[in-house]
Structures are given as C-alpha cells and as structure tokens.
Amino acid sequence: MSSALDGLLRSLDKPRFDVESGRVTCWFGVKGESRHHTVRVTEVADGIRLEATVATARTLDSIAMYDDPHRWAWRRNRVSNLVGFRVDAQQRLLAEAVVPLIALTEEEFLTYLMAVASEADRMELVLTARDVQ
Amino acid sequence: VPGLWHNADLREHGDLVRRVPDAGGVDAADGDSLLRLLRLPEQLGIVEEPDDRGHDLTVEEEMLLGDPAADAQRVAWLVARVAAAADRLEEALWAGRDAGTEFFKAALADQDRMESHVERA
C-alpha cells in the first residue's frame, strides 16, 4: 500500500470507521448499533478504487429485480453521480468510485468513501431490506 | 472535450467532471462477446433508442474537481482511464476492430446535438 493511501486511511475518525487491511467499515450512526457498510480500498494506476458489495450473487438470485442486474446498473450509471454500479465476474452487484490520487485531500477522500458506502447501503436496503454488507 | 460537462449538484464539494465516451452499439455483438463484456471491471452505461431500435454502450466515470492547479492533470487522468476502458470494451465486443476518429466524431456530434436540444427545450 502506498504511503499516500496509508495516510488517507489513518486520517479517518476512529468513532465512525473501522479500518483493517484495506477494508473500511463506515458506520452511519453509533458504532455497533447503526447501519454500516464495508468499502474495499485498492490502488489502481495513479488512483484508488473504492468498491462496496451491494448484494451477493445468491442474494441477487433470490430477489425479484424488475430488470436484468447488468442492464439495471448500466441504466443507473447514465444518471448517477460519483458512484457507479456494476455486476462483477462473481455476479455480485457492486457500487464503486475510482479516484485520482493527484492532489487528493483527506476531505475529498472522505467524500468519495461516504458516497460509495451510503449509495451501496441505500441500495442494499432497497433491494434486500437487510444490513449484511 | 466532447461529452465533458460540469454537474452543479455537487458544487458544494467542488465541481464534478463526468466523462462519457461512446463505445458503440451492442446489438450486433454475439453471445460470447457479451459474456466477455460482462467480465470487464468497467462502469458502463446504456443508451437505449426509442422503439427498441438499438442500444449504445458507454463508459461512465465521474470525479470531483478541487484544487484548480491540479484539475487539468485530473481531467487528463480521467480521459485516459475512460478512453482505455472504452477501447477494452470495443475489443471485448468486436475483437480486432478499432473504430477510427471519424466514427466517434459523428457519434459525439449526434450526442452533443441531442444534449443541446434538451438544454434549449
């Protein structure tokens, strides 16, 4: 992990976030009691990928989406801001943002992190009414 | 840059840049190509024409603008990422095809005309 990313992860508030091996659990209220969502943070060329699972393949199979999940994600990406959706090779529905490391501030990193966590959590609530991820 | 605009909704956090290159129509792609497409780690969008006349796929990524001194570098990073992703998408759908600038100029001009029309309406 680069020192830039390491520094950004260290800058996160302990009362609101749990950080472990490139995984950040974001709490939307009191830690341990409120809804939460885990975001995976990995490096790409000159950037960071923030990725959160909305629903696993098994969950996607079990719920009645009105549309094919790929097409649903593609339609949504046309109108969404900052956070995109895709279905990966494991057939999981993911929310993600890819962020340039160029002059990236802690405040901007936090904005992206919370945008991915909250979009993924909101979509998990809408699709499954649960708080697993 | 065609297809580039600012979004006012996130202005309180800095401006947002969105880059949407058109990767081409998906209807002519065969089943194997579509399976390759579904394995790509890209954020895609779909433009559906009225009356089921066809579909175009796009690569969609957004980022915040912040320090003006770094914005040009960020935009260059975004454009390079999305152009590379669109090329991978084109390769996955139609192995060996690499449509030239003229093809995309026409598609982008159509898109700009449609967006200008919507803005005026």
Image (spheres, rainbow, N blue to C red):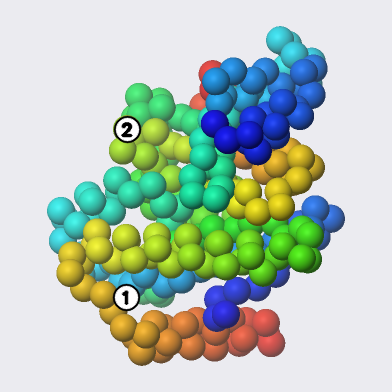
Question: Is any part of residue B26 visible from this angle?
Answer: yes
The chain to which mark 1 is attached is B
Query: In which quarter of the view is residue B16 placed?
Result: bottom right
Q: Amino acid at mark 1?
A: Arg
- Which quadrant would the C terminus of chain A be assigned to in this image? top right
Label 1, secondary structure: give it.
Answer: loop
Q: List x then y, in percent, for residue A44.
A: 49, 45
Residue occupied by mark 2: A90
Residue at 26% in and 75% down: B98
- In the picture, the disc for residue B53 is 1
Residue mark closest to the camera, 1 vs 2: 2
> Measured along the vertical axis of the image, is residue A13 above or below residue B2?
above
Q: Position of residue B106 (x, y in %)?
A: 41, 89
Residue at 60% x, 74% y is B4
Q: Residues within 10 Å of mark 2 (few under 14, many from 20)?
A: few
Instruction: State the CA–CA distance, disc 1 to disc 2.
Output: 31 Å
Quadrant of the image occupied by residue A13: top right
The residue lying toward the viewer, choosing from B49 and B75, is B75
In the rendered image, residue A89, in percent from the top left (x then y), is placed at 31, 38
